[in-house]
Image (spheres, rainbow, N blue to C red):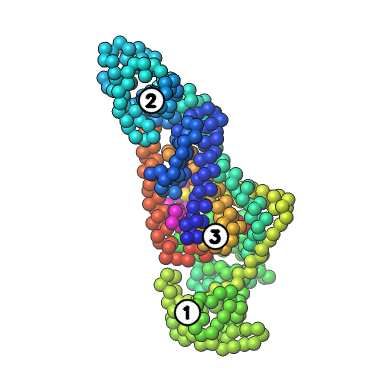
Amino acid sequence: MITILAFIFVIGILVFFHELGHFLLAKRSNIRVEKFSLGFGPKLISFVKGETEYLISALPLGGYVKMYGEGKEENIIVEKVADTESPFASGDRIIGIKGFSLEKYMNWQKLLSALESDTKPEKEIEVERDGRIYTFLANSSALYNIEAHYEKDYQRGFSNKSLTDRFLVVIAGPAMNFIIPFFFMPLVFMFGISVSSYLEAPPDITYVKKDSPAHLSGFSVGDRVLSVNGKEVTNWRDLNIAVQSNPDSLIEFEVGNENETRVLTLFAKAGSDGRVETGLGRPIATNIAEVAKDGPAWKAGIRPGDKIKAIDGVEVTDWNHMSDIITESGGRKLDFIIEREGEKMDFRLAAEMEKEYGRYIVGITPNTNTILKKYGFFESLYKGIAEAARMTVEITFLFFGFLFKLITGKIALATAGKTVAGPLLIAKVSGSVAQSGISNLLQFTSLISINLALINLLPIPMLDGGHLLYMGIEKIKRKPLSTKTLEITQRIGFSFLILIMVAALYNDILRMQEDIFSQFSKILDLFR
């Protein structure tokens, strides 16, 4: 239940404020807004206020603001109705009048003149209203008692507004998504933000996994990473970002120790989830935070708070080292020496193959040493705004840097495909993050919001960036693109988005077999 509620919260916040941006700027520009919907598909709840219908729809995967002037230009829009008995309603689209071709007439007045000369007392009218088509008979007086406009002439239509007004309406959606973190991050600092203590520590290598890319490239325990691809790194956070932003590519490291400084090259291979595992280990103590009930460790008597000192006579001082010993055991019995409240205790147990992870485990998780930081109102406001700004700049540089590498061939398309996440993953992560506290949920929502804004700015038809591209072309050509061109490009854009959604769902299903929250907690760590 908490997963569903958290998912609704995250998606609801992101969609509502995005569409609210479009809506407010449309109203400011005196554009007639037909619908404001959270979700797609069949409506669940709706009400009409003024000239706009507000809806909550069945599919909570987005939303839309439907404005007049976005359809075919031959439609006729009913602006006002003078007679309360009229079959017409404000907002109707007249899409057909039997015996008349609407496309032949330049404007509503010329169409009225043609209708007046017709000998039939009543005309068969076809109207689109609330997404449905209605047909009824209307006499000449009913037609004269309405104010109507061809969509191409409708001054409150989106397409008839100035380029500046249309630009502001379109850009307002992504802008609202950029603004969300500036409201949420001060709350995060006020409620308390958990920070992994290792992130600000110098990037000293305490463990190198055997046969890993790092091991094969010549990394050694005791090395300190000084720079990545020529850019200085001063802590583990910098190192994580540098590595994760270069999947499936060669990375040049400058490392140093007490004796020498050297340059090493490593191929950063991306896993099935798009993340890079280099084999470089950060300091993780062997203190146990949690023990899975009914797992091998629990059955043997190991409990939270214990510290692993040795396995099969081999002293272990790092969790990564200990994990490798367990993984490589093949399920045979292992002798553990545990320290509990100052006393050493012996345990014997065998690891079990966990199908989800494809490796041997004993059911224990480490104490990762996080620091909870809380601040007062004014300090939270200052630190939150500063953090939101830093996050926005950093993610923007990473996002467009990734796109540049993709376009120039430095990152393969297949690698980029692994990084695409969809609604199933967001739902699962939202639930997991919500269980860890409201601060983490707000921070996760801020992270997704920035990414949503950037994605929407891509010049792909059907996205806000596609509309901005159309406007740029219109500015250069000094006339809008033809209806046919718009239809073709939007079909292409729609097909592309469907392909991305299918890829995202496919990735989500694969990731459901893995420990998703642990993967995303690593990503969240990059921006804490």
The residue carrying mark 3 is 434
Total numbered badges shown on the rendered structure: 3
Residues at discs 1 and 3 in contact (Cβ within 8 Å): no
Q: Please identify, in this view, whether the residue under mark 2 or under mark 1 is nearer the observer.
A: 2
Residue 422 falls within the magenta-colored stretch: yes
Q: Which residue is drawn at 43% across and 56% down?
A: 424
Q: Residue at x 38, y 47 (%)?
A: 498
What is the secondary structure assignment of the residue under circle 1? loop
Seen from the viewer's position, the closer of residues 44 and 357 is 44
Query: In x, y percent, where is residue 4?
Result: 47, 57
Q: Which of marks 1 and 3 is nearer the N terminus?
A: 1
Q: Residue 294 got which mark?
A: 1
Location of residue 124 with respect to 405 vertically, above or below: above
The residue carrying mark 2 is 88
The three-letter code of the residue at mark 2 reads Phe
Q: Which residue is drawn at 45% across and 33% down?
A: 34
The three-letter code of the residue at mark 1 reads Asp
Residue 505 falls within the magenta-colored stretch: no
Range covered by the magenta-colored residues: 407-427
